[in-house]
Amino acid sequence: MYVCNCAGVTQRQVRQAVNDGATTVKQLKSELGLASGCGQCACDARELIFDTMLANATATGAAATGMAVSVGQPARPSFA
C-alpha cells in the first residue's frame, strides 16, 4: 500500500528504511522523497515509523527473554 502518493513511496519502503535506521519523517524525506509533495502523508508516516520501531523492539525483547510477545498485548511469561 502506498504511504505517499506524490512520491510513490510504499509501506514496505518505509519499513525497510526504518529497519535501516531512519527514525523521522525528515530522514524518510531525504532517503525516499516521502512528504516532499503535498505533505498529507506525514502523519501516516510517523505512525508507521512508530509501529515498525515498536515491532522491532518487541521482537528483540522477546528474543532476549525467551518469551512470546504479540504487539498490542501484554507480555506474559510461560510457566509450562
Image (tube, rainbow, N blue to C red):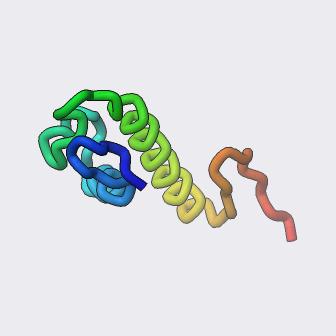
**Residue drawn 13% across the image and 41% down it:** 30
Query: Nearest the camera: 69 or 78?
Result: 69
Q: Residue at horizontal 42%, vertical 55%?
A: 1
Residue 32 horizontal side relative to residue 61, left or right: left
Q: Residue furthest right?
A: 80
Where 22 falls versus 13 (above or below)? Answer: above
In this rendering, position of residue 17 left or right of residue 29: right
- Seen in the image, is 52 located left or right of residue 10? right
Query: Is 49 placed left or right of 54 in the picture?
Result: left
Residue in view at x 43 percent, y 43 percent: 48
* Quadrant hosting residue 3: top left
Foreground: 75 or 26?
Answer: 26
Residue 10 appears in view: yes
Count of marks, rendered view = 0
Seen as rendered, the residue at the extreme bottom is 80
User: Where residue 28 sits: x, y (%)?
Assistant: 22, 42
In the picture as drawn, the residue positioned furthest to the left comes out as 30
Q: Is residue 28 visible?
A: no
Residue under the point 85% across and 64% down: 79
- What x and y, as percent, mark residue 55? 51, 52
In the displayed structure, 39 sits above or below 78; it is: above
User: Observer-nearest residue: 52 or 75?
Assistant: 52
- Quadrant the C terminus occupies: bottom right
> Residue 40 sits in which quadrant?
top left
Q: Position of residue 22 (x, y in %)?
A: 26, 45
The vertical placement of 79 against 38, above or below, is below
Image location (x, y in percent) of residue 16? 31, 59
